[in-house]
């Protein structure tokens, strides 16, 4: 197994690919937005570490205090995304990336590491069984979503109180979104066009600050969907998934 990894930094950000949207033209607007977002996050201690090859192999994490998620904890690291796909699976890359994150947290004197997961595997979320192999346990849960953590000192993180609201006072399709994921701008375009063509009321709420992210009234990793006032999913929606949500 090649152990050639690199961390995205301000001096190489413009020239490095971001793994999950390497060459897909429809996501290049999202890549540009993500790189601008990273330029502001990296000085806060945000880490984007990837395999130094053309593939989807990376981990992204940050100090919980500056992580754009409605999760609270004393001196934790939060993992936004751990992704190994395609032909890169089964080579130990996920283990290497996660081990690096855990050791980095220990070196920084952190209380532990946490990540959003679920009781049953969901798209865009790390698999619970894999995380448990490294000692992660359920620190908190809301319905089917679970906050997993590995604690170095007995302290545990938790979902912020506002995440338990799980509702929004509107019957419109309502989407909270950030610009951390390169897929999001194209998802918004597809949803907006479909809703316009089908006379479906829709509202987009951009989460463009740390304060807004900490105050989202539901589970949120960079995306959250409400329909008929009820929280539905953190699953990114393109036109196909939107139809399943609306017409199931």
Image (cartoon, rainbow, N blue to C red):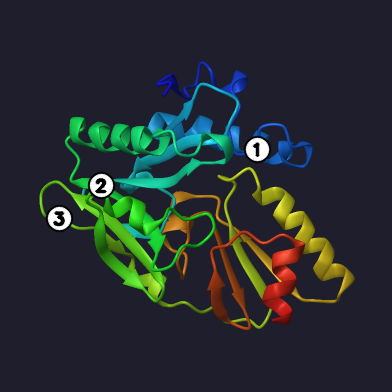
Tell me the distance, in whole angstroms, between the alpha carbons under discs 1 and 3.
Answer: 36 Å
Viewer-nearest of discs 1 and 3: 1
Indicate the secondary structure of the residue bearing disc 3.
loop
Residue beneath disc 1: 21
Indicate the secondary structure of the residue bearing disc 2.
loop
Q: Is residue 202 above or below residue 237?
A: below
Quick one: label 1, few (<14), some, or many (20+) residues within 10 Å? some
Picture coordinates of residue 19 (x, y %)?
58, 33
Question: Mark 1 vs mark 3: which is more N-terminal?
Answer: 1
Q: Residue furthest right?
A: 197
Q: Nearer the viewer, residue 31 or 172?
A: 31
For the point 79% across and 76% down, the residue is 200
Q: Nearer the viewer, residue 177 or 51?
A: 51
Report whether 123 appears left or right of 182: left
Residue beneath disc 3: 155
Report whether 52 appears left or right of 100: right
Residue beneath disc 2: 134
Quick one: label 2, few (<14), some, or many (20+) residues within 10 Å? some
Q: Residue furthest top?
A: 11
């Amino acid at each position: 197994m090649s152990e050639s990894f690199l961390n995205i930094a301000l001096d190489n950000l413009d020239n490095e690919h971001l793994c999950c949207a390497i060459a897909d033209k429809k996501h290049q607007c999202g890549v540009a937005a993500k790189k601008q977002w990273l330029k502001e996050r990296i000085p806060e201690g945000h880490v984007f570490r990837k395999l130094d090859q053309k593939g989807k192999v990376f981990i992204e994490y940050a100090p919980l205090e500056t992580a754009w998620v409605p999760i609270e904890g004393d001196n934790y690291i939060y993992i936004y995304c751990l992704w190994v796909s395609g032909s890169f699976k089964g080579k130990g890359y996920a283990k290497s990336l996660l081990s690096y994150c855990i050791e980095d947290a220990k070196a920084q004197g952190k209380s532990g590491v946490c990540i959003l997961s679920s009781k049953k595997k969901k798209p865009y979320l790390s698999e619970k069984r894999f995380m448990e192999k490294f000692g992660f346990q359920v620190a908190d849960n809301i319905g089917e979503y679970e906050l997993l953590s590995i604690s170095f000192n007995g302290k545990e993180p938790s979902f912020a109180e506002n995440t338990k609201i799980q509702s929004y006072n509107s019957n419109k399709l309502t989407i909270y979104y950030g610009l951390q994921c390169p897929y999001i701008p194209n998802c918004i375009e597809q949803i907006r066009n479909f809703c316009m063509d089908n006379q479906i009321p829709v509202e987009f709420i951009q989460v463009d600050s740390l304060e807004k992210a900490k105050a989202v009234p539901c589970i949120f990793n960079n995306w959250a969907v409400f329909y008929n006032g009820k929280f539905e999913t953190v699953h990114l929606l393109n036109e196909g998934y939107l139809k399943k949500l609306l017409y199931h």
